[in-house]
Amino acid sequence: MLDKVNELIGEVNTFKATSKKEVEAFRIKYLGSKGLLKNLFAEFKNVDAELRKDFGQALNTLKKSAENKVNELNDAIDNTTEDKGSYGDLTRPGEPIEIGSRHPISLVKNKIIDIFNRIGFTVSEGPEIEDDWHNFTALNLPEYHPARDMQDTFFIEKNPDTLLRTHTSSVQVRYMENNQPPIRTISPGRVFRNEDISARSHCIFHQIEGLYIDTDVSFADLKQTLLYFTKEMFGKSKIRLRPSYFPFTEPSAEVDIYWGLETETDYRITKGTGWLEIMGCGMVDSNVLTNCNIDPAKYSGYAFGMGIERIAMLLYQIPDIRMFYENDKRFLEQFTSVI
Ligand code: PHE
C-alpha cells in the first residue's frame, strides 16, 4: 500500500502538461471527489495500526504534491499564453530598459555649457588641425616667442606650419575674425600637447574656453562671471585671482576656488591649503583684438580657459587621467544617468 502511494508521488512530481485541459484532467484524477486520494484515504482504516503513521504522512505528501503541481502548471500556462499575444496584466511594471552612460567628459562639458548658456554665451567650435596663425601668431605669440614653449606642440607639417591645436583659443580667433562685438562664446574641444603621459597629464585632453567682448568690459565683469560659474558648478562661493602670465591676455590671472578643508580628501586635493586652481583668465590683449580686426579703442573683453578632465577628476574623484581614454566599461558604467 505504502509503495503504491510513493509510486504515485513520483508520478505526480514528474507530470507535465501544456494545456489547461490536461491539468484539469490531472486534478480530477488525483484530487477530484471520486479521485485517487479520496479512495486512498478511504483505505486508511484497513491499514495495519503500526503502518498507519507512515501511510498517513505519505498520503498527505501526495495530496500536497498534487495541489502544488496543479497550481504550478496553471501558472506556467498562463504566462506562456500571455507571451503569445494577449496583453496580460496591463498594470504590471514594465521591463526595465537598460540605458547607456554618457562619458564623464561629456557630462562635465554639458554642465559647463549649460551654465554659460544661461548668461547668453553660445557654443563655437573649430578644427583640431590648425595653422600657425590661429593657434599662435594671432594670439600674440609671434614666431620665436619664448612663450610658445609653454605648450609643447605636435607639428604635422613645417612651412607653412600645420599642427594639432594646443588650446581652443584658436577657435576664439576664428570667431572674432568672423563676428563683430558684442561677442559671448564658449569653445569646448579636444586639444593636443606633446607631453609625457602620466596619472596627472595626457597628450590629449579637453578644454573649454570663454570669450566676452563688448564696449566697457572690465576686470570686475570677468570676476563676477567666474564667481557665478563657480557657484553654479561647484556650489562654492569664494574665489581668488592670482597674477599670472598668458601672451594673449593682459592682465592675466589664475583662478583658485576655496574648496574647504572639511574632509581628508579636501586636504589631499588642495595640498592642505583649502585652495584649488581651476583655470586661467585675463583681459584680451589689445594686440589680439587688432589681429582679429576688432578695434581695441572701442572694445575690450575677457577670456578664460579650463581643462575639462581636471574638473571631472575633481567632481568625481577620479585618481588617474588615463581612465578617461581606456573605455573600460566598469569605469564608464558608473556614470549611467537619465540625461
Ligand atoms: N589657452 C590657455 C591655455 O591653454 C588658457 C587661457 C585661456 C588662459 C584664456 C587665459 C585666457 O593654457
Image: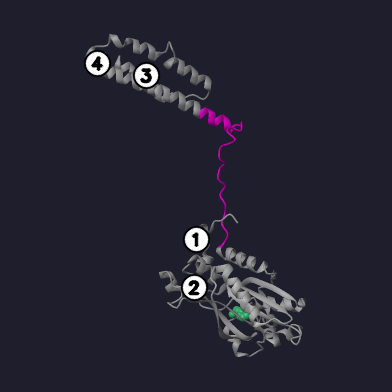
- The label shown at residue 291 is none
The quadrant the N terminus occupies is top left
Question: Residue 188 at what x, y percent from top left?
Answer: 64, 70
- What's the amino acid at mark 1? Phe
- What's the amino acid at mark 2? Trp
Instruction: Give the foreground label among 1 and 3.
Output: 1
Residue at numbered disc 2: 259
CB atoms of marks 1 and 3 within 8 Å: no
Q: Is mark 1 within 8 Å of ligand 1?
A: no
C-alpha separation, residue under disc 1 versus residue under disc 3? 56 Å
Ligand 1 quadrant assignment:
bottom right
In the image, is 171 to the left or to the right of 146?
A: right
Residue at numbered disc 4: 51
Q: Quadrant of residue 249?
A: bottom right
- Upstream in the sequence, badge 4 or badge 2? 4
Instruction: Give the foreground label among 2 and 1.
Output: 2
Question: Residue 276 at what x, y percent from top left?
Answer: 50, 76
Q: Which secondary structure lies at badge 3?
A: helix
Residue at numbered disc 3: 8
